[in-house]
Image (cartoon, rainbow, N blue to C red):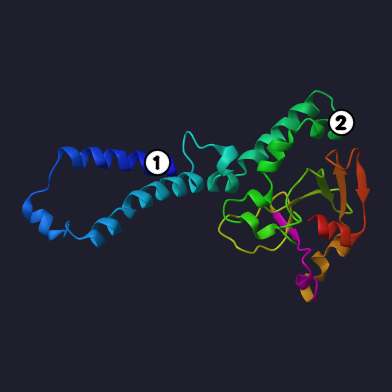
Amino acid sequence: HHIAAGTLGILAGLFHLSVRPPQRLYKGLRMGNIETVLSSSIAAVFFAAFVVAGTMWYGSATTPIELFGPTRYQWDQGYFQQEIYRRVGAGLAENQSLSEAWSKIPEKLAFYDYIGNNPAKGGLFRAGSMDNGDGIAVGWLGHPIFRDKEGRELFVRRMPTFFETFRVVLVDGGTELLEPTVHLLEGRNRKYSVEQVGVTVNCHLGWRTQWSQLYCDPAYCEKIC
């Protein structure tokens, strides 16, 4: 940001050294007032800020992803999620086990697909005291695979960028199957609860889960969701 603003300031300075405004323009824009000069100079900062904000939100051919994180379109289109599943699929095609295939996924690639890196969310998913670092991602716990009692694999529906809050919904092949959030477990939605559908989660190789672990506790499944 400072480099861009400074470069623009240097170019503007060279322009003013070589060009003088006509008298009518000088008086019309009140260039003799120090207030006018100072207030109009913020345009250089605005220009640089718009460039930075635009590249962070929409991205560009040279966006430094390690600095800005995923862009809006990368997140909504599941750009990194697709790459993760492509690598896992390639590993399974080479007769690797599911845990072995997931163990080959770099932590940085998994981190780019973390909800805290959603460009519209940022720190909203950090809980606890920032002084102690609570809630800040420090490692990859592993990849959870959800299944119902019939053995069908379930997927957590991706949180779109333009939603500030979004209910947790598990889907099966694109069809809404169940809603594990607490306030949706009553009445007609009771049959879609984690308990009724019989959801289990199998966590594969990650930072803490060094082996495949199966969890059947509904409360824990909802927490993982």
Q: Which mark is residue 65?
A: none
Q: Is residue 204 magenta?
A: no
Would residue 67 appear left or right of 43 to someone viewing this image? right
Residue segment shown in magenta: 175-186
According to the picture, the residue beneath numbered tag 1 turns out to be 4
Asked whether the residues under the numbered discs 2 and 1 touch, taking CB atoms below 8 Å apart as contact, a structural biologist would say no
Q: Secondary structure at mark 2?
A: loop
Q: Within 10 angstroms of label 2, few (less than 14), some, or many (20 or more) residues?
A: few
The residue lying furthest to the top in this view is 94
Res 111 → quadrant: top right
Q: Nearer the viewer, residue 200 or 119?
A: 119
Q: Secondary structure at mark 1?
A: helix
According to the picture, the residue beneath numbered tag 2 turns out to be 97
Q: Nearer the viewer, residue 43 or 208?
A: 43
Examine the rendered structure and indicate whether residue 62 appears above or below residue 151. above
| Residue type indicated by callout 1 | Ala
The disc, 2 or 1, on the residue closer to the chain's N-terminal end is 1
| Residue type indicated by callout 2 | Ser
Q: Position of residue 204 (x, y in %)?
A: 85, 40
The C terminus - image quarter: bottom right
Which residue: 69% across, 32% down?
86
Which residue: 60% across, 63% down?
164
Would residue 225 appear left or right of 212 to someone viewing this image? left
